[in-house]
């Protein structure tokens, strides 16, 4: 099985390499020289038809030719969106950070923080992990944590924003992702018989993510650890909480 996976990954890399080499030989199509208003209309047409690659080409040309024109701010915002839709996370994040830095009082900051959160969540889901079905909860959560901060920023400082409701929904999903990450570490400690470390990690889930789906598993793991350590009182306390919230748990049968 490992040989098959290596063969698949090698084949994918070869295809990507060949594709990049062939594309490098193909000259990028030139954007027609037009007035900025006409170029912007062309970009909007491409956006409406979901042709994000062509839209970004036109917007990049518009930004390069008329950096201080009447459409400059909107061009930057549209470019960020096209980069996000094309999974160009690095470009999207760099442009978002640059725009916020240069326009700290812009009226569309809620949109920018919301888009930064979306981009970070997209970058958190990597290609090879999806391809090989690797548990994403075991990965470095730094991007998910940053997305959590950005969505929280939208909710806190722009509660009436049109993006606030969706930001709140995404926070729930991120909490689950972060809680499962903590649970994977707690389970890792348990397998190595580091029961105290496992309990402490499980407590992070109870304290920081009490409304996540990982709470039941965290409590179950804590009870098992207490049992291994012969800690009767903490075990009984955890069992009482488990019974109150998850009466059908296997430990209660």
Image (spheres, rainbow, N blue to C red):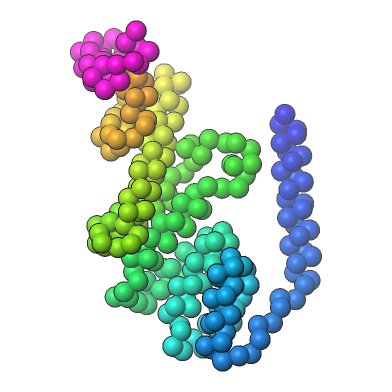
Work out whether 205 lies above or below 114. above
* Residue 60 visible to the viewer: no
Outermost residue, bottom side: 35
Task: Please give left or right for residue 211 compared with residue 38 in the image.
Answer: left
Q: Name the quarter where the C terminus is drawn.
A: top left
Question: Magenta region's main secondary structure?
Answer: helix
Q: Is residue 47 left or right of residue 216?
A: right
Q: Position of residue 242 (x, y in %)?
A: 27, 19
x, y percent for residue 17: 75, 57
Mark yes or no: residue 40 visible. yes
Task: Please tell me which residue is depicted at 77% across the width and 72% down the height of the picture.
Answer: 26
Q: State the extent of the magenta-drawn residues as a range.
A: 226-253
- The picture quadrant where one finds residue 58 is bottom right
Identify the image quadrant of the N terminus: top right
Rendered image quadrant of residue 176: top left
The correct choice, above or below, for 60 with respect to 143 in the image is: below
> Residue placed at 35% from the left, 57% from the top?
150
Which residue is rendered at x = 26% and y = 62% of the image? 160
Above/below status of 43 relative to 9 = below
Q: Residue at x 52, y 62 (%)?
A: 84
């Amino acid at each position: 099985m490992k040989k098959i996976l290596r063969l698949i990954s090698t084949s994918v890399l070869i295809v990507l390499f060949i594709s990049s080499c062939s594309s490098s030989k193909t000259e990028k199509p030139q954007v027609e020289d037009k007035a900025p208003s006409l170029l912007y209309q062309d970009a909007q047409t491409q956006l409406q038809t979901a042709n994000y690659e062509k839209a970004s080409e036109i917007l990049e040309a518009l930004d390069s030719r008329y950096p201080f024109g009447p459409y400059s701010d909107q061009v930057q915002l549209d470019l960020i969106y096209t980069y996000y839709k094309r999974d160009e996370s690095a470009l999207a994040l760099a442009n978002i950070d640059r725009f916020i830095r240069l326009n700290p009082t812009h009226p569309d900051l809620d949109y920018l923080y919301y888009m930064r959160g979306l981009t970070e969540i997209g970058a958190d889901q990597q290609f090879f992990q999806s391809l090989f079905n690797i548990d994403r909860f075991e990965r470095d959560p730094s991007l998910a944590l940053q997305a959590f901060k950005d969505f929280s920023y939208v909710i806190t400082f722009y509660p009436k924003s049109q993006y606030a409701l969706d930001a709140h929904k995404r926070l729930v999903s991120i909490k689950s992702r972060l809680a499962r990450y903590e649970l994977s570490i707690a389970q890792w400690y348990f397998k190595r018989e580091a029961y105290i470390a496992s309990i402490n990690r499980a407590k992070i889930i109870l304290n920081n993510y009490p409304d996540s789906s990982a709470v039941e598993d965290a409590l179950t793991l804590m009870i098992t650890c207490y049992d291994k350590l012969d800690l009767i009182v903490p075990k009984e306390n955890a069992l009482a909480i488990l019974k109150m919230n998850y009466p059908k748990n296997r430990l209660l049968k």
